[in-house]
Amino acid sequence: MNLESCNVLLVEDVPLLAKVTEQMLKKSPAHRYLLVHKETLAAGIGALESADFDVVLLDLNLPDSRELDTLTAVLDAAPDVPIIVLTATQSHEVGFQAIKLGAQDFLMKGDFNYLVLDRAIVYSIERHHLRRTLQRLAVIDELTGLYNRRGFQMIHSDIVQRQKWTKTRGYLCYFDLDRFKQINDTIGHRKGDEALAEFAAILKTAFRKDAFLVRLGGDEFLALGLEAAPGQAEASVKALQAALTERNRSKDSPFPLDASCGIAHFDQDGPFTAEDLTAAADAALYRDKESRRQARAPSGGELREMRGTA
């Protein structure tokens, strides 16, 4: 790691230990540490909410929190910041439990020097960055930047739980691209990838920032979320269709971009499982696709824009 400066949050309620830690950081042979010290969990979380930090040095036993509850609270407040736990016990068990929960390292108070602390900070930041990168790659579709199927499985249960807490109506919108196979077969898979990426970009503009957008696979997409007001999902779909219509009218492209959509809602009565919800939305999508197919002129006009070579 090559840092000009590293912002460190130290959450420690013993002033003498905080001073010793600060002096250690000043002795670093390779890095410049900028330290912010807080004495309570509440103050530490407040600091994380108001400023950016590269690492947290966290005492587990504070005036307003004890043991692993302290770590859990900081993990919830700042999941993107690596945490090094400082423990007063000589048993490694608490440290190992902390790492299982999500801490990057643990150090026993009075049992490390400035070189050990410096190395722990450097390695923790690098490990955390690698872990977050791997987690992101595991749930993000590389082509579109949306969540993938695995990501959908992870966020679905969270959305359902939020619905139960808030009692607002949830929605799942299921999309697939019309005539997508013809794009691949007529002008090539590279253009097909362009169509998928472009649709994902338009999808992001049509839905609220708090919607979860998914590329389920192939040309199938999902939008999942809770309605801030009745009819929000339908309004977002209309905005999407309007954006696609405008795109097809104004953009010089070798292919039109259209999508069929099915919407399923869920509330305190369900459906709750991912399978039931997607099945309901898929059935609605099929009805929409059939309606669009029947409305389309049979002259083959839908192919008029597909031109060029792969």
Image (cartoon, grey):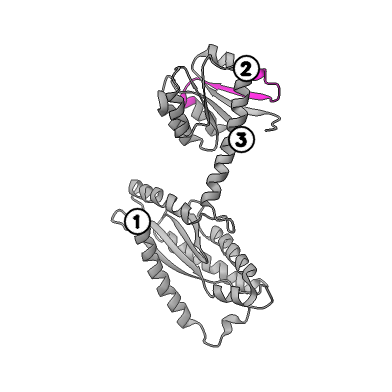
Regarding mark 3 in the picture, which secondary structure is present there? helix
- Crowding near the residue tagged with mark 1, few <14, some 14–19, many ≥20 C-alpha atoms within 10 Å: few
Dot in front, 3 or 2: 3
Regarding mark 1 in the picture, which secondary structure is present there? loop
Q: Quadrant of residue 70?
A: top left
Query: How much space separates mark 1 and mark 3, taking CA atoms?
Result: 37 Å
Dot in front, 1 or 3: 3
Residue occupying the point 41% across, 60% down: 172
Q: Is residue 26 magenta?
A: yes
The numbered mark, 1 or 3, whose residue comes first in the sequence reads 3
Q: Which residue is mark 3?
A: 126
Regarding mark 2 in the picture, which secondary structure is present there? helix
For residue 273, which numbered disc appears in the image?
1
Q: Residue 82: horizontal and vertical position, in percent?
A: 55, 33
The residues colored magenta run 23-43
Query: How much space separates mark 3 and mark 2, taking CA atoms?
Result: 20 Å
| Observer able to see residue 172 | yes
Mark 1–mark 2 contact, CB under 8 Å? no
Whether residue 224 sits left or right of residue 37 in the image: it is: left
For residue 24, which numbered disc appears in the image?
2
Q: Quadrant of the N terminus?
A: top right
Q: Which sits in the foreground, 300 or 205?
A: 300
Residue occupying the point 46% across, 17% down: 88
